Image (cartoon, rainbow, N blue to C red):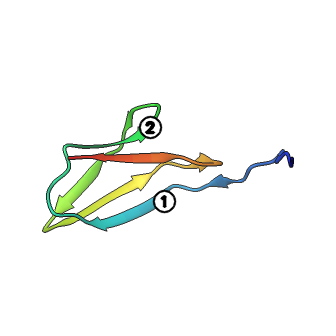
Amino acid sequence: MEIIEDLPTVPKTGCTLRVARKPARVYLAPEKKEIPFDYNSGVLTYTVPAFSCSTLVVIEF
């Protein structure tokens, strides 16, 4: 087993995805923090806030 004592922080990160329809919501799990997003002509854009270790983004349609 290896213990990682100092986890680096990943700075806020912009994401762009092509999706078939506009999402109902975009949020972080499990904390359910809403992430503002834009949807235009099949392209979804949002920014993930800074995080350490890992995070999970849920896109709900």
Residue 56 appears left or right of 40: right
Tell me, for residue 13, which label it has, or none. 1
Residue type for callout 1? Thr
Residue 22 appears left or right of 51: left
Q: Tag 2: Cα neighbours inside 10 Å, few (<14), some, or many (≥20)?
A: few
Tell me, for residue 33, which label it has, or none. none
Quarter of the figure with residue 43: bottom left
Q: Tag 1: Cα neighbours inside 10 Å, few (<14), some, or many (≥20)?
A: few
How far apart are the two marked residues, 1 and 2, measured between alpha carbons? 16 Å
| Sequence-earlier tag: 1 or 2 | 1
The residue lying furthest to the front in this view is 1
- The residue depicted at 46 percent of the width and 31 percent of the height is 31
Residue 5 appears left or right of 39: right
Number of numbered discs on residues: 2
Q: Position of residue 39 (x, y in %)?
A: 19, 59
Tell me, for residue 29, which label it has, or none. 2
